[in-house]
Image (cartoon, rainbow, N blue to C red):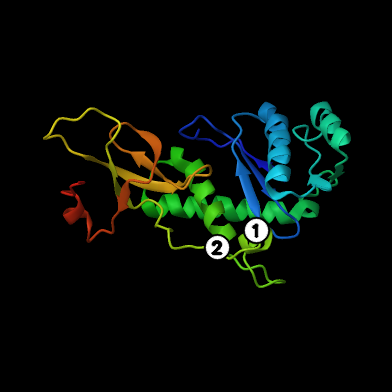
Amino acid sequence: MDLCGPMRTQSLGGKKYVLVIVDDYTRYTWVKFPRSKDETPDVLITFLKTTQVNLQKQVKILRTDNGTKFKNKTVEEYLESVGISHQYSAARTPQQNGIVERRNRTLVEAARTMLSQSELPLFLWAEAISTACHTQNRSMIHRRFQKTPYALINNRTPTIKYFHVFGCTCYVLNDRENLNKFSAKADEGIFVGYSSTSSAYRVYLKKSKTVIESVNSRTCTSREQIRWRFVVYF
């Protein structure tokens, strides 16, 4: 794992760092977004506990650099209590931790391209990185096994039918407000990713400048936008 940051622009939720975690065997990747370096030990410990329960597999070795964000008393005491070995790369030798360093660069470059192409504000960088991680886990092929990381770690083929273009226009059913009979029933938004806790999409609402999760949404291509501006939900 590796911590990247601080970013010059805070995310919509006030995050400034991204913690990239890669499984050495399957190359499956997770991303977490701490607000500061001080949160890294707590985020790391919570991730290890949750992942081991979800996958029913024991983490054996943790590989990081020599930064104080990983090399501290809190992390060492926890790893020692559960029997996880901690390996460090040599000082000023990031190539020894090259797997996660390259994945870190891949995610950041993908997010930069996505934000540039969609012309979205930079404070949505965390949503872009999370979406890039989600799609790459389900689409990139492991050269040794000729399978995606998702297929290797979950023992099933992923579906990509629900994928949409990052930054496309979408319309979300407005079921959060008490509307009268002639109020608009859909809010215009921007598709910014997939929920990590439920089967829902993440949408940035232009009106309230917030990100919500919803399944009652419809994404549009440029040709469909005019037609769907007058969409009616029954």
Instruction: State the SS at label 1.
Output: helix
x, y (%) of residue 221?
Answer: 28, 59
Q: Classify residue 234 as left or right of residue 20.
A: left
- Quarter location, residue 122: top left
The label number, if any, that marks residue 42 in the structure image: none
Residue that carries the numbered disc 2 in the rendered image: 158
Amino acid found under the numbered disc labelled 1: Asn
x, y (%) of residue 66?
Answer: 81, 39
Question: Which residue is at 22% across, 54% downward?
Answer: 225
Q: Is residue 20 above or below residue 6?
A: below
Q: Nearer the viewer, residue 107 or 84?
A: 84
Looking at the image, the residue that sits furthest to the front is: 234
Question: Which residue is at 31% across, 43% downward?
Answer: 189
- Quarter location, residue 44: top right
* Mark 2 Cα shell of 10 Å, populated few (<14), some (14-19), many (≥20): some
Residue that carries the numbered disc 1 in the rendered image: 154
Amino acid found under the numbered disc labelled 2: Pro
Question: Which residue is at 88% across, 40% downward?
Answer: 83
Cβ–Cβ below 8 Å for labels 1 and 2?
yes
